[in-house]
Structures are given as structure tokens and as C-alpha cells.
Image: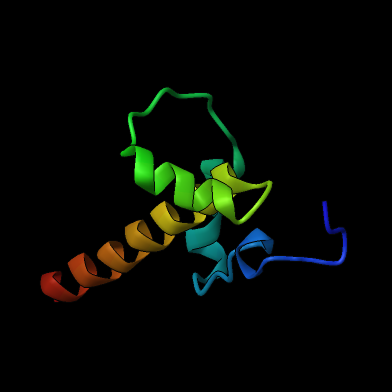
């Protein structure tokens, strides 16, 4: 394993929420074990980047969630 390699997606996600909103999402850092079915090729692609593939999948899902929250808030106004 290359210890010098630090993938961008292994870094904490940048947050743009204000402090009050961040407090309301306090459980965001809490992890829960789940079972999820993924396409084999997609899972192999995430794993091919090395250790931390579950973290990368979580990061992609979080970015999708946050983008859709922003979009939904924009539609409400």
C-alpha cells in the first residue's frame, strides 16, 4: 500500500452549511452498518482506487444528497 497516496475523496467533505444548520445535522458523522446492493462494475471501480472505497461511496452519496437539498430549497423559494 502506498502510504504517500492520499486520495482527494479520503479527505473530510467541505461543508457550506452555517453553524445552526450544521448543528441540526449533528448525526451526519455517525455511521450505521447497512447492506446495499451495488452493480459489480461500479463496486470494482471504487475498490480499484485502493482502501477507503466505502468512504468514497459515502462521499459521493453525501454530495448527491447535499446538491439535491440545495435544489429543493431553491424550488421552495
Q: Tell me the residue at 68%/66% (across/down).
A: 7
Whether residue 28 can be seen here: yes
Q: In terms of depth relative to the viewer, which is nearer, 57 or 39?
A: 39
In which quadrant will I find the C terminus?
Answer: bottom left
> Which residue is rendered at x = 58% and y = 71% of the image?
14
Q: Nearer the viewer, residue 40 or 38?
A: 40
Q: Nearer the viewer, residue 12 or 54?
A: 54
Asked whether the viewer can see residue 25, the reply is no
Residue 9 falls in image quadrant: bottom right
Residue under the image location 45 percent in, 24 percent down? 34
| Residue 5 horizontal/vertical position (percent) | 79, 66
Residue farthest to the right, as pictured: 3
| Residue 45 image offset from top left, x and y in percent | 46, 52
Q: Number of labelled discs?
A: 0
Left or right of 51, for residue 39: left
- Left/right placement of residue 5 relative to residue 21 reads right
Query: Does residue 11 appear left or right of residue 28 in this picture?
Result: right
| Coloring basis for residues | rainbow
Residue 56: image location, x then y, percent: 54, 53
Q: Residue at x 87, y 58 (%)?
A: 3
Residue 1, horizontal then vertical, whole percent: 82, 51
Amino acid at each position: 500500500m502506498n502510504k504517500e497516496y492520499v486520495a482527494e475523496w479520503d479527505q473530510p467533505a467541505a461543508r457550506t452549511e452555517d453553524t445552526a444548520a450544521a448543528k441540526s445535522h449533528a448525526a451526519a458523522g455517525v455511521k450505521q452498518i447497512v447492506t446495499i446492493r451495488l452493480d459489480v462494475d461500479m463496486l470494482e471501480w471504487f475498490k480499484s482506487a485502493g482502501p477507503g472505497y466505502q468512504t468514497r461511496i459515502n462521499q459521493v452519496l453525501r454530495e448527491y444528497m447535499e446538491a439535491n437539498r440545495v435544489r429543493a430549497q431553491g424550488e421552495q423559494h
